[in-house]
């Protein structure tokens, strides 16, 4: 069984984004759309261990990775905000 650690990372950072600087809709639908768009632009990162593993965490939560993920999340959030896909 493998985990896509990038998915956990994106989910984690999306919460940060919403807490800090997102003024669009933050419902589960929009959240899912933002995650999907961002993940389609980021390379998957598979691990046989969950993200809680210290080694994986140190590797993934480097500043470069965080910058890449946040850039894609901001881009995805802007798209979803402009084209809200639900009523
Ligand atoms: Zn919404």
Image (tube, rainbow, N blue to C red):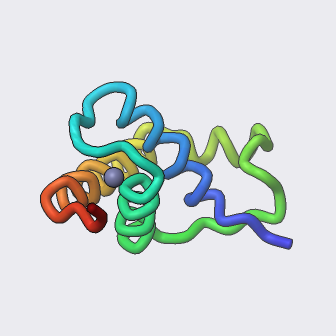
45 sits to left or right of 3: left
12 sits to left or right of 30: right
Residue in the foreground of this view, choosing between 22 and 57: 22
x%, y% of residue 85? 27, 67
Taking 63 as reference, is 86 above or below it?
below
x%, y% of residue 38? 37, 62
Taking 22 as reference, is 6 above or below it?
below
Residue in the foreground of this view, choosing between 18 and 64: 18
Taking 47 as reference, is 20 above or below it?
above
Quadrant position of residue 37: bottom left
Quadrant position of residue 3: bottom right
Q: Residue at x 27, y 61 (%)?
A: 87
Taking 86 as reference, is 54 above or below it?
above
78 sits to left or right of 56: left
Q: Quadrant of the N terminus?
A: bottom right
Considering every residue shown, the one lying at the far right of the view is 1
Considering every residue shown, the one lying at the far top of the view is 20
Q: Residue at x 26, y 49 (%)?
A: 74
Considering every residue shown, the one lying at the far left of the view is 82
Label count reads: 0
Q: Residue at x 39, y 51 (%)?
A: 69
Q: Residue at x 22, y 61 (%)?
A: 84
């Amino acid at each position: 069984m493998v985990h896509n650690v990038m998915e956990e990372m994106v989910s984690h950072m999306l919460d940060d984004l919403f807490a800090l600087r997102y003024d669009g809709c933050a419902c589960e639908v929009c959240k899912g759309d933002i995650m999907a768009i961002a993940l389609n632009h980021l390379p998957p990162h598979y691990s046989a261990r969950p993200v809680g593993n210290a080694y994986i965490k140190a590797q993934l939560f480097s500043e470069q990775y965080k910058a890449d993920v946040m850039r894609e999340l901001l881009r995805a959030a802007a798209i979803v905000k402009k084209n809200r896909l639900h009523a």
